[in-house]
Image (cartoon, grey):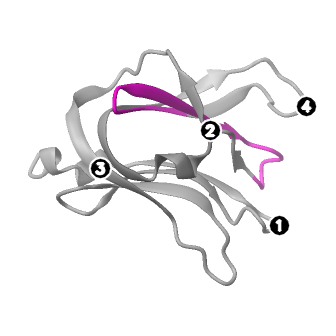
Amino acid sequence: MELKDLVGLHELSGVDTTIEKLKPTEFYPGDCNVVRFVLDGITYKVIEDPDDGLRSFCEELQICDEVVSNNFSPQKVFGKMKENYEYSKNDVIQFSDAVTGKIVLEIGTDYYDDIYPTCIMKWTPENLYCNIGK
């Protein structure tokens, strides 16, 4: 599954970020950043490949049955792929609150075609409409 498959209107009802200890391999050193999120009742998981410490990549989007620790009532969000620029090629999806228009969840790899790609896993719950004034 690819990030672009999640473009469109959805209901976001859970997000958590954590560090998981994965079995060290040539691809994973052991500790990896992870984001799990629930869209339309389906739980997705993304793992960061920290590569060599200067570069990082967002691994392939997975559907999982893991429990997300931070759940809330469903909030309408719209997913769109981040715009590419002349010197910035991205594979990043941005979920914006349908009311505020502000980005609440951003996941993917910025500068994927550059010498220093960067994994993006940004969760900004204060941009959800339900959190205004809290």
Counting residues from the start of the chain, the first of labels 2 and 3 encountered is 2
Disc 1: which residue? 115
**Which quarter of the image is occupied by the C terminus?**
top left
Q: CA distance from mark 4 to mark 1?
A: 20 Å
Could you say whether the residue bearing mark 3 is in a helix, strand or loop?
strand
Say which amino acid is labelled 3. Val
Identify the residue at image location x=80%, y=44%. 51
Q: Residue 1: which numbered mark, if any?
A: 2
Q: CA distance from mark 3 to mark 1?
A: 32 Å
Return the residue nearer the eye: 26 or 12: 12
Look at the numbered disc 4 and give the secondary structure of its residue. loop
Query: Which comes sooner in the sequence, label 2 or label 4?
Result: 2
Whether label 3 touches label 1, CB < 8 Å: no
Q: Quadrant of residue 47?
A: top right
Residue drawn at (47%, 46%) of the image: 6
Residue 57: x and y in percent read: 71, 48
Residue at the disc numbered 4: 26
Front position among marks 4 and 3: 3
| Residue 49 lies within the magenta run | yes
Q: Main secondary structure of the magenta part?
A: strand
Q: Amino acid at mark 2?
A: Met
The numbered dot on residue 4 is none
Label 1's element?
A: loop
- Sooner in the amino-acid sequence: mark 2 or mark 1: 2
Nearest to the observer: residue 3 or residue 72:
3
